[in-house]
Amino acid sequence: MAKGANNRESHGIKIAVFISGSGTNMAAILYASRLADAPLEIVLVASNIADADGLKLAELEGIPTFVHSHKGHSRTDHDAAMEAAAKDAGAQFLVLAGYMRILSDEFVRRWEGRILNIHPSLLPKYKGLDTFARAIEAGDNHAGASVHVVTPELDAGEVLAQVRVTIAPGDTPETLGARVKLAEHQLYPRAVADYVSRGTDPDFLYAKVRELALTLPETHERESHGSPGFRVGTEKTGKFFAHFSQQHHGSEHIAVLVKTGSMDELLHLVETQPDTYYKPAYYGASGWIGIILNNANVDWDHVAQWLGRSWRSVAPVRLTKLHDIADMF
Ligand code: GRF
């Protein structure tokens, strides 16, 4: 736990930052994490370069560090060592900040949606290296920086936030790069904080459930007991297959309620996977189970499967038949 003489103890979503160099973006995130109400804390700064300046700053600030040189190791082995350190530190997200190693596809898939990177261009422009020289060369008016989700394809994941930086006449890659760095230091802490906290943001979770529920055939939304609900069938005769529950009836959970097959199944799931399921007040008695959404590791494919199953259990036969036929192809 990082502690500073004049700083509050930070408790929050745990992130590990991977660096290879000066680590100024890491420093920007670190100091932002010490502001009041910051949602995250850095639990580890890890590097493949033993004398990276950023490591010294992290040590000075009492943040645990980890070094593992990539030299003499396969990519998979090096990644595994970095990953183990991040996991041991309890990291829920990985933040790359000038980390000059490409992560193996398997690593990225294991952390899908939980690795962020900052890239010094306005993506999708100028992926890869020498971004400032390329922007100047092209005669662009603006350069900038982008924060994106890391996917196996380099610099190609969803762009979460960007900042524009004007290119001045006579700019060199160095002068432009220095200003982009200043802008990055504003952008990255905010973008990381927004992204990691959206898992506890009721608006984000509701929008996600809504999108998944309403892609199922012949569905519509209807409020029920003051909460959003989702029905299948016509407006007149439709039936509920899901309810969105935001800390309802004193529960601490934000959840989607779906129909189980039986009370035995419900109780078994709640007992064996208490981090994922709970028995909601009132609804629980008639077989609805709560899938907890406000934790960092929600498996949205799993939520989608449950919604589909719940939909099927109440949908009119004419719809499930069509679905069965479509599933055969
Ligand atoms: C930043 O310019 C970032 O866009 C790129 O690497 C640089 C890291 O700088 N990915 P620093 O180590 O944070 O100072």
Image: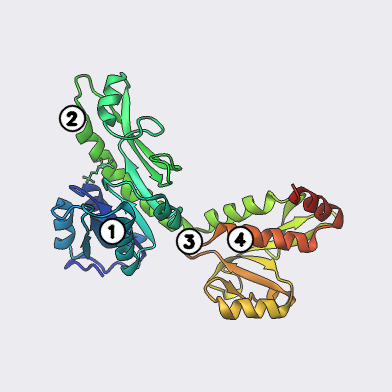
Judge by depth and name the residue closer to the eye, 209 or 86.
Answer: 86
Quadrant including the N terminus: bottom left
Q: Amino acid at mark 1?
A: Leu
Whole-percent x and y of residue 298?
52, 62
How many numbered tags mark residues here?
A: 4
Question: Which of the two discs, 2 and 3, labels the residue nearer the N terminus?
Answer: 2
Q: Identify the residue under disc 4.
A: 303
Residue at horizontal 77 percent and vertical 49 percent from the top: 218
Amino acid type at image mark 2:
Thr
Instruction: Categorize mark 4 by other alpha carbons within 10 Å: few (<14), some (14-19), many (20+).
Output: some
Q: Amino acid at mark 4?
A: Val
Q: Earlier in the sequence, mark 1 or mark 2?
A: 1
* N-terminal-most mark, 1 or 4: 1
**Quadrant location, ligand no. 1:** top left
Horizontal side of residue 135 vs 321, given as left or right: left
- Name above or below for residue 113 compared with residue 280: above
Q: Nearer the viewer, residue 138 or 34?
A: 138
Q: Upstream in the sequence, badge 3 or badge 1?
A: 1
**Residue 200 seen in render:** yes
Mark 2 Cα within 10 Å, few/some/many (few <14, many 20+)?
few
- Residue holding disc 1: 35
Badge 2 is on which residue? 175
Q: Give the alpha-carbon distance from disc 1 to disc 2, as whole Å.
A: 30 Å
